[in-house]
Image (cartoon, grey):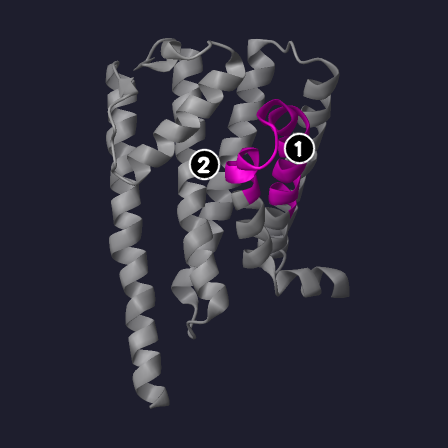
């Protein structure tokens, strides 16, 4: 499809832009307005750009498109009835995790296999790292839902579902970047193991994939000169 091919050329720009909108939109838009109405739109745009990322692979494209349709249904169902049951929440979290895990792997493959390091590869490298943070967030949120009070420090804020979600998003990225302020702590064994895993995958990504891209760029510059 010509339109899809046109979007594919800007796949990393679209994916990265919507990621930044999801993470930092509340800095310029009132928090409640953003979280209740604006962020769901950005999230759907991000999901759509994830589908575009896989548009050159028919089977993967159909797989992600199916999950995209499921997540659209889930989003609208949640708007209509915010008080959903646990099974619904598990389906939602599982769908998001599988979708973003698949997209993250596809981004890493595209960056890894790129022969020429240009703007797209750099943007892909950044968006892949941010995607790891989203995966880490879904992992931590699932742990907190299945095993309540796995993270201490969450109760210091207002204990609404939105506050817990924001805090776990923050914790996931701080752990991925190995900053570790210590204001939120994993206190159960499974939460501690998940935190170690998040820190490890963040370091592996930076050390291995970034080194590969830098090496390709150095070789490319040497050939050009």
Residue found 53% across the figure and 35% down from its top: 27
- Label 2, residues with CA under 10 Å away: few <14, some 14-19, many ≥20: many
At x 44%, y 20%, the residue is 142
What residue is at 65 percent from the left and 24 percent from the top?
36
Residue receiving disc 2 = 134
Residue 158 can be seen in this image? yes
Instruction: Identify the mark at residue 55; answer none if there is no mark.
Output: none
- The dot on residue 38 is 1
In the rendered image, which quarter is residue 67 located in?
top right
Q: Which residues are magenta?
A: 21-48
> Dividing the picture into quarters, in which one does residue 78 lie?
top right
**Whether label 1 touches label 2, CB < 8 Å:** no
The alpha-carbon separation of the residues under discs 1 and 2 comes to 18 Å
Q: Tag 2's secondary structure?
A: helix
> Within the magenta stretch, is there residue 27?
yes
- Nearer-the-camera pick, 69 or 133: 133
Is 105 on the left-hand or right-hand side of 69? Answer: left
Q: Is residue 132 above or below residue 30?
A: below
Which residue is found at the position 30% from the left and 41% from the top? 177
Q: Secondary structure at mark 1?
A: helix
* Residue 90, horizontal then vertical, whole percent: 53, 19
């Amino acid at each position: 499809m010509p339109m899809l091919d046109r979007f594919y050329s800007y796949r990393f720009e679209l994916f990265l832009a919507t990621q930044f909108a999801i993470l930092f939109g509340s800095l310029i838009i009132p928090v409640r307005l953003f979280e209740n109405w604006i962020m769901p739109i950005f999230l759907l745009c991000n999901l759509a750009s994830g589908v575009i990322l896989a548009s050159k692979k028919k089977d993967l494209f159909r797989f992600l498109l199916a999950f995209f349709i499921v997540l659209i249904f889930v989003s609208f169902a949640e708007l209509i009835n915010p008080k959903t049951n646990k099974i619904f929440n598990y389906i939602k979290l599982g769908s998001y995790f599988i979708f973003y895990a698949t997209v993250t792997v596809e981004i890493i493959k595209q960056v890894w296999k790129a022969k020429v390091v240009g703007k797209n590869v750099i943007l892909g490298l950044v968006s892949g790292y941010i995607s790891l943070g989203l995966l880490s967030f879904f992992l931590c949120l699932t742990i907190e839902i299945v095993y309540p009070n796995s993270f201490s420090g969450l109760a210091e804020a207002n204990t609404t579902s939105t506050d817990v979600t924001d805090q776990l998003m923050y914790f996931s990225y701080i752990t991925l970047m190995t900053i570790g302020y210590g204001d939120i702590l994993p206190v159960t064994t499974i939460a501690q193991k998940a935190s170690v895993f998040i820190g490890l995958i963040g370091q592996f990504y930076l050390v291995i994939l970034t080194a590969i891209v830098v090496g390709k760029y150095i070789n490319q510059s040497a050939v050009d000169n």
